[in-house]
Every structure is written in structure tokens, then in C-alpha cells.
Amino acid sequence: MIKFFLMVNKQGQTRLSKYYEHLEINKRTLLETEVIKSCLSRSNEQCSFIEYKDFKLIYRQYAALFIVVGVDDTENEMAIYEFIHNFVEVLDEYFSRVSELDIMFNLDKVHIILDEMVLNGCIVETNRARILAPLLILDKMSES
Amino acid sequence: MVVPSLKLQDLIEEIRGAKTQAQEREVIQKECAHIRASFRDGDPLHRHRQLAKLLYVHMLGYPAHFGQMECLKLIASPRFSDKRMGYLGAMLLLDERQDAHLLITNSIKNDLSQGSQPVQGLALCTLSTVGSAEMCRDLATEVEKLLLQPSPYVRKKAVLTAVHMIRKVPELSNIFLPPCAQLLQERHHGILLGTITLITELCEGSPAALRHFRKVVPQLVEILRTLVTSGYSAEHSISGVSDPFLQVQILRLLRILGRNHEDSSETMNDLLAQVATNTETSRNAGNAVLLETVLTIMDIRSAAGLRVLAVNILGRFLLNSDKNIRYVALTSLLRLVQSDHSAVQRHRSTVVECLQEPDTSLSRRALELSLALVNSSNVRSMTRELQGFLESCPPDLRADCASGILLAAERFAPTKRWHIDTILHVLTTAGTHVRDDAVANLTQLIGGAQELHAYSVCRLYSALAEDISQQPLVQVAAWCIGEYGDLLLEGSCEETEPLQVEEEEVLVLLEKVLQSHMSLPATRGYALTALMKLSTRLRGDNNRIRQVVSIYGSCLDVELQQRAVEYNTLFRKYDHMRAAILEKMPLMERGGPQVDEEAEESKEARLSEAAPVPTEPQASKLLDLLDLLDGTSGDSQHPPLDPSPGGTLVHLLDLPCAPPALAPIPNVKVFEREGLQLNLSFARPSEIPALLLITATATNSSGSDVTHFVCQAAVPKSIQLQLQAPSGDTVPAQGGLPITQLLRILNPNKAPLRLKLRLTYNHFGQSVQEIFEVNNLPLETWQ
């Protein structure tokens, strides 16, 4: 199962964090700094899977933002790698060419999207239209 | 004056504007004070906005526990935006350890039964993330109802919430098992994905469910086949593969169902072959599916042809330019190498190439795999490659590589000379990283290879002359020079270029070792003893040696000082015995597990010298130690001394024994339940008649692992019992590695032995406790 989902930028600032298994709050910041440090120290030729304590980290870099997903041993790393890209595509469609600022200022919407896609550490929905449908309805409701 | 509250966006702007940590903290603290005040005042309109800010601050790592009650209030409010924020807050701030946790149960219950679909969705999401065991029990029926609702949006979430509930409260699986069959017939991929996860969770939890779900294997095969063979479907296609996530999940479930089960595996064979051949490999999504297929093929009882196909796919992955794919290929091959050794051997050359990767995680995997692939036919070429790697590898891999090479050399060495060469090479390149027993192994090896004495001593001498910093090398070289110095001086070795060595040079070298600040005390000991031995081997006079030895008589290191003093005495008073004492050592047997070879030889040397000086007080104690430790050493110079009463020393020295078995006492089976067996085997060492060693072995022939296995024992008061730590606490299923535990029983009064055992363990998902008395102990155990 997915243990946590993080979006951290190159300076080490967390833009999104979602933990599917309980972790103390001070341990979280520690985890995030260590994770971003190991991701930053990798070069382009190295593979995107890191072993960290008892998790496996799968990360992808988009411009200045790292999306890091921590999973346990049972998950297929390449499927998660694909999933990260899927998530970014969904964000792209919703925000039309998403950037880091979009994520920062619309954090609650990004959470909603993530909740639509991952429930309790398991992937539930990957179809873009179906993920965004409730969000678009919500937007329409709040406008009117 | 009421300061208007900031919107979330403005807060974020402010935080971004803060230049330093301190400034940021200030901004946040000010805002938190506002938020707290606003919560106290209870302004309903802006509550969700305040909570949003609080959650942002929480994400940055600041404490936010005062917002918990607000979450509750927001959840209870009828407005959707409030509910949304409240549930989000609950997910992030509340967890099982908080007291406010249980209070949301009621709100969730209401929302689940009466809310609109989005609201139900929110409630399910929160429940599945933070639901505690009690909450799950309360709300199980609600969730079950939602499973059968027509709307797919809610159903897919309800299914995954069920997964969470089962994880928390395994008894609830009874409720969620029946709907699965119906859910599998859905066409909506979201529901299917959730259902497969649910079934996977159920099967992992209980073997009964596993048997039940074997029936749906054909259905799963059909679903997967449709996915693979259907053409492009805009809804689900990701880079040309039709819903790879669902495919991967189904494959994983098939793996669990087919493991160790012939029929299911047969049904899957065709399908797996089809998936393996049809999937697009140019993009990552296809490769993900292929990887899962390969893992499934290897785990179930598949046909041989299929397994070869799987290994070939992995081989293809290895040649791929994408690092990620190579990484997973190496990891999977490592898992397979035990079971399908020959198939993996075919890809050996590619694996060896991967050693050169700049990425450490890849090269580490490649190293492990290469070491696993070494066998007697390829050992020479593999070792050469590995040695090349050792020279250039990053430091954290050095130790593993060095020990790996040494181990492989030990198991598969074609000739002794090659073996010695290899170890020598490893010691010179990575001397500081080898394990401690490498020195012992090498000395024993050289000692045993009589024909190679001259060769080894020449090589070691040249290596030592070049470099005296690598301690293991120096130790072995010093020992060798001491033992075979005469062969070195003859210089007549056919296998290397003839080396003309003068006596003076040898002595100078050894003195250099003695004086160097890089030498460890142990190394110095070796060098000093070697010098001593050379005094008999060399033909010149011994003044130089005597000088050095007497200097060290006042050395600060107590070990060295004692040796030097003894050697001095040997020169002065016992010169006539010197030659006999310092003869060549006979071959050492591989000593008992705790005996350090170096300690052994130094004690033997001291033993021989102490024989003519029985007044030396330490000698007798050493002899006793030696007697008990060195039971198998074949040193012919051992003077006959009566062994001191073994009884008292047994208590002082806790000897973990490889039991020297005498008068074999039959094994006894004392316990058996559902495939878990406990056997006792006995040994009574002859030197200590009161001691009985019992080895308790727990084996598991059932289909489910035994975990948290703890065995405790009790004996009557007149008997002493000592329980040592077990080898582990898990016995894997199907005859996996058994747990052994040693019990030491001292029964000096020869009282009748009674033994009561208490076992606690987890088996088939239940915890078991058994207390029983062993009543079939053979008489020989205590008489």
C-alpha cells in the first residue's frame, strides 16, 4: 500500500503531504527533509527508486517540484511511477498547465483530487474525466 | 477593533514573503492567535476558512491540535464547503490517539445514511483513513449497504473503506465476503479495482477465504483477457495499455490465488503467456504490467516454458536503457536466482556488465546477483570480474564485495594456489574491509597446503615489502615469514621469479612492522613471534633478534611485554629448548567457533614455554582454559597435565557448544499441533557429567506461517536450567527454516528430570498457548 504522498520543491518546502499511515508530526518534517535530500542527491542517470528505511521511494521530478511516493514492499514500483504521471496529468487538465503556484494556492482542491484517486493507500480511480467530475460540479455549485 | 481575517491565499503570500525562519514563525504565530480567537468566538461563517489556514500551517509542521473541535463542528454543519473542510481537517489532524476521534462517529453515521453522494464520498474517505477499530465495528453495516447502491461513485469508495475495515478488525471479513462475487461482475473499472483489492486483502487474511476465492479464478482470467485483447479504449488507455493499474492488481491477486495450487495455476498459464507476449513494451505502463506478470509466473506453479519466458523477459529488461527497468529486473532476478538458477545463469554476462553502473543502488543489486551466480564452472572468470569491480567500487560496497569474493573462493576454489592468490589479491586491494576471520582462514589454508609454502611465503614477502599498512595482510605475512622463513631464504621457488632475500632484509622488514604506528597491537604480536621463530630458522647469529626482543621487554603494551619477557627468558635460560619449542607448527584444525586462531597459536607458544617453568602463576589458568577451549587441537607438544575440575569452570565460562555428541540419546517429539512440531534432541558432553544440552527444534509443515513463537521451560527445584536465545521467532510454512533453541540443564544430584514447556505462538491467524509436561524423557538424560 502507499504509505505517503509528498510534493516537495527543490528548496525543501513541502507543497502537499498526505500520510496514509500515522506518523508523529515532528517525525514528518524529519522524513520530508531526508527524503528530499536523497532525491536531490540523485543525478539524471540514476533510477527513480530509492530504498529508505523500510519504505521504497518512487520519485519523479517536474520542473522544480519533486513528487515522492513512499510504498511498502508489496507494490509494483513501475505502476506507481506511472501513477504519479497520471496524477500530474489530471492536475494539468484541471488547472490547465499546472504550476507550483497553482498547487500552493489551491491546496484543498489538490487534496480533493488526490482523495479521488487514492483511498487509504490504494489506487481507486485513474480515469481523468471521472476524477474531475465531482470537482467540476463543486465548482459550478460554488459559483452559482 | 476586529482585524479582518486573512483569506488563505493572503496568508500564503505572507508566509512566502517572510525572508527568514524567524519571520515566518512570527507570521504564523500571529495568525494562529487570530484563528484561536475566532474559534473561541464561534463565528460560523468563516470557520472553514480559518480551518483551511490552520491546515496549511499544520502542513508546514506547526502544531495545530486546537483545531480538532472545530473539525467536528464543521462536519456537523449542513453546508458542503464546511463539511469538506471539516473532513479534510479530520483526516489530517485527528487520528486514533486523539480523544476527539470517537466523536465524529455519529456524524459519519448520519452522513453515510442520509447524505448526498458527494457527502457520502467524503465520509467514506475520512473513515477509511482514520477509522479506528470501534468506529469500524459500528459503521460496518452502513458501509455494507453502500456497497450495493447503484451509484458507482459511492460504491468504489465503499469497497476500499471495506478494505480498511478488514485491516483493522479482521472479524468483519465475514460481512464483506459475500458481496464480492456480485461486485466482480461490474464493468466499472473503479469498482473492479476496489473489489480486487478487497479480495486480495481477504485472501491474505485467512486461508479459508483463499480457498473460497479460488473459484473465481476463471472469472478473473476472463476480465484480464478482455482487458488485454480489447482494442484501444479512450476511457482507460494509458500509453497504449488498457488500464494498466487494473491489470497489475488482477495479476497480483492471481499470484496469491495460484501460489502452491496446481489447478488454478493451470487455468492461468495461457493467459499469462498471452499477456507476456502481447503487451507493449515501449512505454513504462506496459513494462509495469510485464513486471507483474513475470513475478506472478515465478510464484505460481507454472509450466517450465513459461518460466523460461519470464526469465527471458527479465533478461530483455536488463538490456533496456532505462535505469528504472534495469533496477526492477535486477531485483526480480535476485528473487529468482535460488529457484531457477540455470535460467538466470544465461544472463550472467549482462549482470556483470551492470556492475559498472554509476548508480549505487543498481551496482549493489548487480553485486548481490553476481555473487549468487558464482558456481564451480565460472568461478575463475567471475572472480576476475569481481576483483576488477573491487578496485573501483564505492567504499560502502567494498566490505560486501570483499567478503563475497572470499566466500565464493572458499566454496568453489579450483586449486589451492588459486585460492591463496585470490585471497591475497583481496587483502592487498581491500585489506581494511575484510572480515576478521579472513586472517585465520588464510593461515589455516596456507598451513595445510604443504607444497605451496614456498610459493606463499615468497608472494607474501613481496606484498609486505611493498605495503605494511593493510593489517590483515601484514598479520598473515608476518606469520608466514616466521613459519617458513627458511624457505624464503632459499629463494628457490619455481612458481614465481626467484627472489633473493637476505636475512638482514627480512629482519629489517619485521622490525619495520613492529615499529610502524600503523600496526595494531595484534599485528605487533604476530611480528614479534615471527622474529622469535626466525631465530631458529636463520643461520646467522641472533644478536639482532635478541636486541629487539629485550627492547620490547619494557614495552607499554602488556601483551607484548609479557611475550618479550618470556622470549628473553627463552634465550637466556632455556636456549637448549628453543629449537624444539619453535619448530614448525602442525596443521591447525578448524578450531571451535569461539577460538581465535591467533589466540590459539600464542597460547600454544606460551604453553610450551610454561612447561619448564611451572611456577609461573598464569600458566596453569591458561592451561585450563586451553584444555577446555582447544579440545580438538592436535599439537603434539602438549605436555600431559591433568585437567582441572571442569565443574566450576563451566559456570564461569559460558560456552555455547556445538555439542560433542557421545552416547547418542534418541530424539523425542514432544508436541504436535496442526503441522507445528517440537522435537527435543539431547547431548551429554563427557567431561561434564552433570550437564545436559537439549536442543528444541520447531518445524512447520502446515500451509501457514507460525509467528511470535516463544518457548519457555521449567524444571524441578534441584535442577538448574538455562534457556538461551532462540534462533528466531517465525517458522515459515511448508517446512521452512525451523527455530532452534538451546536449553542447558545442570543436574549434579542426578535427580529425575521433569520438564514443563509453555509455548505461545500465532498460527492460522489465531494466537495459541500450550502448557504441557514432557513425560517421555529417556532415562539417559538424567542418570
Image (cartoon, rainbow, N blue to C red):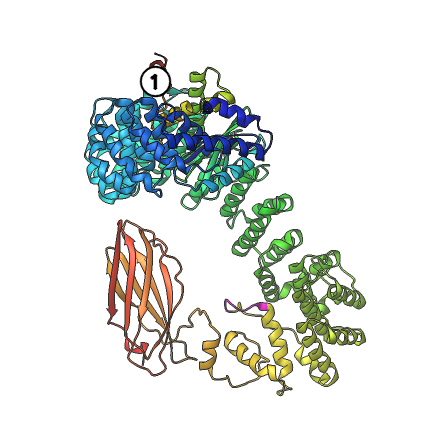
Residue drawn at the location 35% of the way across and 73% of the way down = B664
Q: Position of residue B536 (x, y in %)?
A: 73, 76
Q: Is residue B76 visible?
A: yes
Q: Secondary structure at mark 1?
A: helix
Question: Total marks drawn?
Answer: 1
Q: Relative to residue B184, is residue B618 depicted above or below?
A: below
Mark 1 residue type = Leu
User: How far from the left and from the top, in percent, is residue B511?
Assistant: 76, 67
Residue occupied by mark 1: A138
Numbered range of the magenta stretch: B592-597
Q: Nearer the viewer, residue B121 or A45?
A: B121
Residue B421 at what x, y percent from top left? 63, 55
Q: Is residue B452 above or below residue B406?
A: below
In magenta segment, residue B83: no
Q: Nearer the viewer, residue B775 or B631?
A: B775
Q: In which image quadrant can residue B581 be found?
A: bottom right
Say whether residue B99 is left or right of residue B380.
left
Task: Work out which residue is located at the far top of the displayed protein and give it.
Answer: A144
Vertical relation: B173 (above or below) B236: below
Residue shown at the point (76%, 60%) measured from the top left: B499
In this orientation, does residue B200 appear?
Answer: no
